[in-house]
Amino acid sequence: MQQNSRIFVAGHRGLVGSAIHRALEKAGYSTLLTQLRSETDLTNPNAVHRFFEAQRPEYVFLAAAKVGGIHANNTAPADFLRDNLHIQLNVIEAAYKAGVKKLVFLGSSCIYPKHAPQPMKEEHLLTGPLEPTNEWYAIAKIAGIKQCQAYRRQYGFNAISLMPTNLYGPGDNFDLQNSHVLPALIRKFHEAREAGDAHVTVWGSGTPRREFLHVDDLADACLYLMQHYDDEGIVNIGWGKDISIAELAAMVKDVVGFEGDVVYDADKPDGTPRKLMDTSRLSELGWKPRIGLREGLEQTYRWFLEHRDAVRG
């Protein structure tokens, strides 16, 4: 990518897309193309092809997706499967036909089997059953990976697939009905502190272990790999270390300043027991994260407070 390359960030209003857009602006890229859903519905193939034909982007970051936590995935499986398949099929096909030079596809750590060896290596993909609570989203993302690989093999289309771990940061979704665990905990502890509640209830047993990466680190990795990686093999993006949900809750409680108790609702699903990325391939490619979890939590909570009236949910 050159400073004046025409770059399309699909999903620029979301957590990941907005971080990529910020990183591109900071790095001095001057021709950034974006589209609101009201302007171009990425689930509509005709609309997507019209956009690519008119704007002719040279590089694409495919960060648009329908995302959500366990509750959202459980209650709307058809939406998660259908919408993500449509977005991926349309954007990758249109990018290829429009002569895009390179595309970055963003997947997720949930593509790996529920009981994959830990830490999860890229070669563990498709070696076992998925976690039932998010298999619809995972299957769609796996299809996106395979589409990128198929277009590379058949058409020589330069598409790479990156698999981020659990993400958080500015622009996150704090809606308790469909958010991921970290923003949900921030909001729960904040509102409990404001209300003077005696305790906060956390879904599950608290024992599952999760890895978290600040979204600005992910954006930096995306720009780096756009410039330095060209292969069909997927690349994990993460810290390479994890924390239990109970430990995370204790850290969020401390950052927010909540002084009550934490209660675990073991009747609620835990999801995958552990999700830890093996990031050795990423390290060998020359990139490492910089924002530690405590620092990132404090920054994200400040952002939440500053945007409290406007945050989603």
Image (cartoon, rainbow, N blue to C red):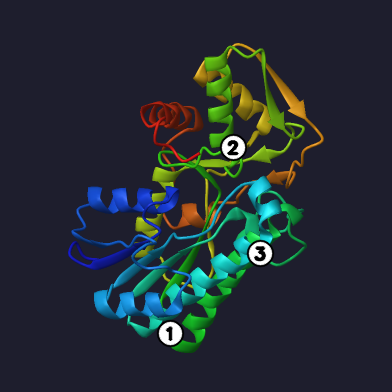
Answer above or below: position of 298 versus 118.
above
How many numbered tags mark residues here?
3
In the rendered structure, which disc, 2 or 1, sits on the residue that comes first in sequence?
Answer: 1
Left or right: 221, with 107 as reference point: left
Image coordinates for residue 77, horizontal then vertical, percent: 68, 60
Disc 2 or 3, which lies upstream in sequence? 3
- Residue 148 drawn at (x, y percent): 50, 75
Mark 1–mark 3 Cα distance, whole angstroms, equals 32 Å
* Residue at the (66%, 53%) spot, across then down: 73
Task: Give the left or right position of residue 212, taking residue 290 as reference.
Answer: right
Give the residue pinned by disc 2.
176
Q: Quadrant of residue 227?
A: bottom left
Secondary element type, mark 1:
loop
> What residue does disc 1 label?
156
Q: Is residue 100 visible?
A: no
Q: Nearer the viewer, mark 2 or mark 1?
A: 2
Q: Residue at the spot x=53%, y=22% of the render?
A: 190
Asked if residue 244 is positioned above or below residue 272 in the image, the reply reads above
x%, y% of residue 215? 44, 45
Q: Is residue 196 left or right of residue 24?
A: right
Q: Which residue is mark 3?
A: 78
Contact, mark 2 vs mark 1 (Cβ under 8 Å)? no
Q: Residues within 10 Å of mark 1 (few under 14, many from 20)?
A: few
